[in-house]
Structure formats: C-alpha cells, structure tokens
Image: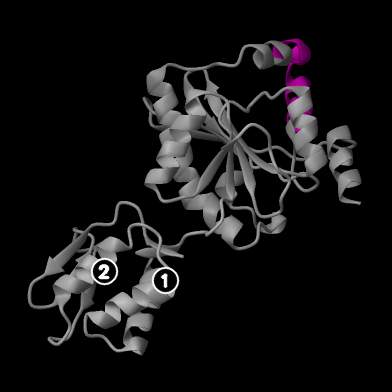
C-alpha cells in the first residue's frame, strides 16, 4: 500500500503541472505534458491520502492521460523523494491499553495513516512492536511476559512533566528494563525502593502533557519506527533515535539522550535467550 506522507500540501502549478509543498526550496514540482489533465492528477494524489495499492494509483494516473510506464516511474520517484511512502497492510503497532494516553496515541497514528491496534496484552510476533504509553516502569509480570514472548517493545511516558521515550527494547539483543534498573541502582543505592513506588504510582500527567506525549510519540513512530518494521525489524539496524532514552522538554526546547548497555548476567535477558532456543 502507498500513501501520501502526512502534512504534504498538493497544489496546482499553472502552466506546468502540480507541486508538493509550498516553499520554493522545499517543494517538489511534477511537470505534466499538455495532454495530461493536471486537475485529475492532483485529485488522484489527494485520494492517496488514504492508503492505496501501487496498481490502483498507477491506474488512476493512467486515466489522467499518462502511459503506464510514465505513471509507474512518477510513483517510484515520489517514493524516493518522500512525498509518498509505503503503508503496511497489517497492523504492526500494538498499543497497550493503559488509559487516555494510549487512546490519544492511536488517534494521532490514525491521522498519520499508521495502522495500530489497541490491545490488553503484548504479542510476540517478529514483525510487530508493542508501544507502552505508561511503560517506563512496568510491573514485573508485564516485563517477564514481554521477555518470554520476545516481544519488541517501545516504552514511553511522562517523567517530571517531560515526555520520555525509549529505548526500543528487542529481547535478547538490547538492554531491557532489568538492565536499566541495574544502571540506575549503580547510581542510587535506594533505587529498588524508588522503582517500586514509581511502578505503583505512574505519573499520569495532565491533559496537556498527555497530548504532547501522544503527538511526539506518534511522530517518532512515523519517522523512525515504521520504516524499520517494514525493513524486517533487524536488531542490528535499530535507528539511532530509538536506541536511547530520549527526554523532551517542550518549554526549554531541549532533548536529552541516555543510552544503556545490556547488563552482564542479566536474568531477564537470559530468559529471552532461553525462549529463543
């Protein structure tokens, strides 16, 4: 399936054809011969704001007066330019049902034409990622379930009023929650007690911070995660942005990154390795 990238403006360019974008330095111009109906081409791409097949879009462009090979070449060129992108036909994103933030995220993903399923439990399929909107300090049971199923998961949430995302966790390949706890415990001897309280009382955030979390997380998924899933979820090719815990302060305009290495002898990582065997 193919879809016009979110936020793309499609305009008529008199005497030339159509263009994608407004600012001259950023716009992509599609010149069209006189025999091709530019208005019909514009409408064909507007219709592709919801996912269509390559063949369907190709057929629509042919009805505007293009030859089949020309229409196909235009589609491929716009895919390379980022004007169009591939939209998965299945639902590769599972959003754990954790309240308003999860529902708000699904709404944001829908606006970006990204299929997502709101579920109560994670699924350990190799082409799917579980997103946790209140998942920075999960319960032991949930963490063990994720590791046993080897479910790829992306935690996110609010800490101190700030949107915090990541890192993407691929059981058996990256640091897990137990690894991160080991890191924090090395910094704070009382971390276990603090962690238990953070799990019992997750920071819900107000309406504004919840909306900010959903908005930011949806765009991270759109920009960094969907392409990685489409390419096969290679654990050796995790996008750099997703390889760290990123904290965004919208008021100060500051983004902070923190990376975590797998902890030697981590029992949770060993559990994932056992599940893989």
The answer to whether 164 is drawn above or below residue 159 in the figure is below
Q: Give the range drawn in magenta.
A: 178-194
In percent of width and height, residue 36 lies at 17, 83
Please name the residue shown 53% across and 23% down the image. Answer: 99
In percent of width and height, residue 176 lies at 75, 36
Q: Would you say the residues marked 2 and 1 are in contact, meaning their CB atoms lie under 8 Å apart?
A: no
Counting other residues with Cα less than 10 Å from the Cα at mark 2, is it few (<14), some (14-19), or many (20 or more)? some
Q: In this view, does 40 lie to the left or right of 262?
A: left
The answer to whether 68 is drawn above or below residue 221 in the figure is below
Q: Is residue 249 visible?
A: no
Q: Which secondary structure is most common in the magenta stretch?
A: helix
In percent of width and height, residue 206 lies at 42, 16
Question: Disc 2 marks which residue?
Answer: 44
Question: Which residue occupies the foreground of this view, 180 or 56?
Answer: 56
Question: Which residue occupies the foreground of this view, 176 or 150?
Answer: 150
Question: Disc 1 marks which residue?
Answer: 80
Q: In this view, does 258 lie to the left or right of 217?
A: right
Question: Which residue occupies the foreground of this view, 46 or 82?
Answer: 46
SS state under label 1: helix
Please name the residue shown 74% across and 28% down the image. Answer: 142
SS state under label 2: helix
Earlier along the polypeptide chain: callout 2 or callout 1?
Answer: 2
In percent of width and height, residue 8 lies at 28, 56
Q: In this view, does 147 lie to the left or right of 153?
A: right
Please name the residue shown 55% across and 46% down the image. Answer: 241
Looking at the image, what colour scheme do you see?
Answer: one colour
Q: Is residue 23 visible?
A: yes
């Amino acid at each position: 399936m193919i879809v016009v990238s979110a936020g793309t403006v499609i305009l008529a360019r008199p005497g030339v054809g159509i263009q994608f974008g407004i600012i001259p330095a950023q716009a992509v111009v599609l010149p069209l011969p006189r025999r091709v109906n530019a208005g019909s081409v514009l409408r064909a791409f507007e219709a592709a704001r919801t996912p269509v097949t390559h063949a369907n879009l190709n057929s629509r462009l042919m009805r505007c007066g293009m030859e089949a090979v020309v229409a196909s070449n235009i589609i491929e060129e716009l895919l390379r330019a980022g004007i169009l992108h591939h939209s998965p036909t299945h639902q590769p994103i599972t959003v754990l049902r954790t309240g308003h933030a999860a529902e708000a995220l699904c709404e944001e993903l829908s606006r970006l034409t990204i299929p997502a399923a709101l579920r109560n439990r994670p699924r350990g399929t190799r082409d799917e990622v579980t997103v946790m909107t209140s998942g920075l300090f999960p319960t032991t049971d949930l963490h063990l379930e994720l590791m046993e199923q080897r479910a790829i998961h992306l935690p996110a949430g609010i800490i101190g009023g700030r949107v915090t995302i990541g890192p993407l966790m691929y059981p058996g390949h990256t640091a897990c929650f137990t690894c991160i706890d080991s890191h924090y415990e090395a910094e704070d001897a009382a971390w276990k007690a603090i962690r238990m309280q953070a799990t019992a009382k997750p920071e819900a955030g107000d309406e504004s911070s919840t909306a900010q979390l959903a908005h930011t997380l949806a765009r991270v998924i759109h920009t960094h995660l969907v392409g990685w899933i489409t390419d096969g979820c290679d654990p050796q090719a995790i996008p750099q942005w997703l390889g760290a815990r990123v904290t965004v302060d919208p008021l100060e305009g500051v983004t902070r990154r923190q990376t975590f290495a797998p902890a030697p002898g981590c029992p949770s990582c060993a559990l994932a390795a056992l599940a893989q065997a």
